[in-house]
Image: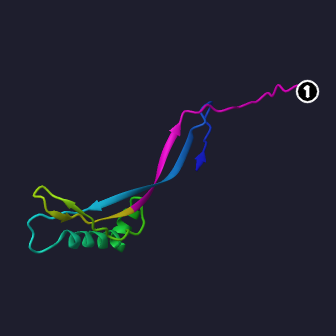
Amino acid sequence: MRSYQVVDDDANHKEIQLVEKTLQVQGQVSDSDKFTATDLIATVRMIVNSLFFVDALKKHRVGVQRASDIRTPYFLNDQGDYQQSPSFDFNVTFHREIRLNTKAVTALYPDIYRI
């Protein structure tokens, strides 16, 4: 969106763009008998997809898109063991506003001649 509100010689130029950002949530657990990293990430994913979370962000003019499926890659940890590192992504959308210092044009005198 682009808008102008001319005051004297200032155009008060404002542009608003819809921005989309991808966020990644990743989890690891050390020394837990109760929950695995995948259990915790699945719980966080449920929260991100919940109506409560979506409504809370909407109040701040941030939109939330559905979270992706959980990925469960493995990596080699400090002890030389393979450890799971589950993660998922979700997108948020919001508006970003910029104000430009634009002078207003009050008159235009074309100087076009036929050749």
Task: Name the side, left or right, on which 113 lies relative to 87.
Answer: right
Specify whether residue 4 is in view.
yes
x and y percent of residue 51 in the render?
36, 73
Q: Is residue 62 above or below residue 6?
A: below
Q: Is residue 80 above or below residue 8?
A: below
Among the 4 quarters of the image, the one containing residue 15: top right
Dominant secondary structure of the magenta stretch? Answer: loop
Q: Residue at x 76, y 30 (%)?
A: 108
x and y percent of residue 69 in the render?
36, 71
x and y percent of residue 40 in the render?
21, 70
Dot 1 corresponds to which residue?
Answer: 114
Q: Identify the coloring.
A: rainbow
Magenta span has 110?
yes
Mark count: 1
Quadrant position of the C terminus in the picture = top right
Numbered disc 1: secondary structure: loop
Q: Residue at x 10, y 58 (%)?
A: 79
Specify whether residue 62 is in view.
no
Among the 4 quarters of the image, the one containing residue 68: bottom left
Magenta span has 85?
no
Return the residue found at the far right. 115
Task: Name the side, left or right, on which 110 lies relative to 58.
Answer: right
Q: Is residue 87 above or below residue 42?
A: above
* Magenta residues, start to end: 91-115
Q: Residue at x 55, y 43 (%)?
A: 14
Identify which residue, 34 or 72, lies in the foreground. 72
Identify which residue, 112 or 68, lies in the foreground. 68
x and y percent of residue 37 in the render?
20, 68
Return the residue found at the far front. 80
Q: Residue at x 11, y 75 (%)?
A: 34
Q: What amino acid type should be assigned to the residue bearing mark 1? A: Arg
Among the 4 quarters of the image, the one containing residue 81: bottom left
